[in-house]
Image (spheres, rainbow, N blue to C red):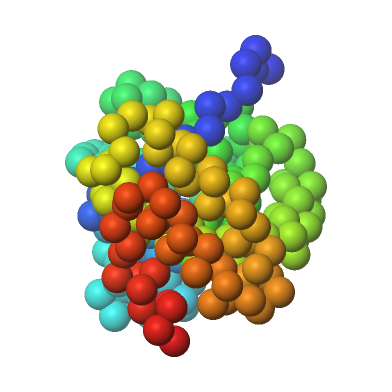
Amino acid sequence: MEKKYPYYPIYLDIENRNVVIVGGGNVCARKAETMMKYGARVTVVSPQFTDEIEKWAGEGCLQLKRKKYAESDLEDASIVIASTDDEAVNTRVAADCRRRHIPVNVVDVTPLCEFIVPAIIERGSIQIAVSTGGRSPALARTLKEDLHRLVGPEYAEVNDALGSLREAAKAKLPTDIDRKKFFDGIIAAGVLEMLRQGRRREAYQAIAGACEAAGVAVSDYVRNQLEQ
């Protein structure tokens, strides 16, 4: 059945959460690697596994259940991914998850998914998620490549600098409007372009100047950058 509404974009904290992946092939390996990267406790259920998955299990990075899928494998799962090449198994996993109210993704079968996984661009502390609603993974990958060229490391650097000022700004500036004006003013001063052009000291001087004008304490992060 075709969806009436698009997917709602959301970021999930999966650190130390139980993620169950059904299927032990190459697709499973890619999904497991991504889940482990974000701190999940991964369990893979399958009669057989790729050498890479076996290696991760031997290193204690994930757990294996060397068996055919059963609904009991979903116990304590926060998220489930079905990545087998057996349509009947994938359909059963999806149905079992829905009955248990567990978010499920069935790889490449959008109608069975309760969530889909976007293409992800990472630049340090900056993350950008790209989705085509499951219609065209190839286009999502192309968008990812285009954005990766557009978004340089200066974005993450400014993000870290502004993040280091948040608590001091909250303490000094009483309203959301005041804080928005403060942070928007720093961006408007052109610090991204300064960093893009290698004018790092000038960029951090502009940030420190904005802090001084607003009465916001300069963070150790910004001060350290000025001293370099």
> In the displayed structure, would residue 157 be above or below residue 198?
above
- Residue, far left: 76
Q: Quadrant of the C terminus?
A: bottom left
Comparing 2 with 148, the one in front is 148
Image: 219 above or below 88:
below
Examine the rendered structure and indicate whether residue 29 appears above or below residue 139: below
* Residue drawn at (39%, 69%) of the image: 222
**Residue occupying image coordinates x 43% and y 63%:** 208
**Identity of the residue furthest to the front in this view:** 213
In the picture, measured across the screen, residue 212 lies left or right of residue 142, that is left
Q: Quadrant of the N terminus?
A: top right
The residue positioned 78% from the left and 57% from the top of the image is 146
**Residue 100: where, in percent of width, then height?**
29, 26
Seen from the viewer's position, the closer of residues 8 and 27 is 8
Number of marks present in the image shown: 0
Name the outermost residue toward the top: 4
Residue nearest the viewer, comparing 186 with 64: 186
**Image side of residue 205 versus residue 128, left or right:** left
Q: Nearer the viewer, residue 25 or 56?
A: 56
- Drawn side of residue 35 relative to residue 134, left or right: left
**Given the current orientation, which residue lies at the most extreme bottom position?**
228
Tell me where residue 213 appears, x and y as whole percent.
42, 51
Look at 31% across and 38% down and name the residue there. Answer: 173
The answer to whether any part of residue 118 appears in the image is yes
Q: Is residue 24 visible?
A: no
Q: Horizontal and vertical percent for residue 71?
A: 30, 36
Q: Where is residue 219 shown, x and y percent of the image? A: 31, 64
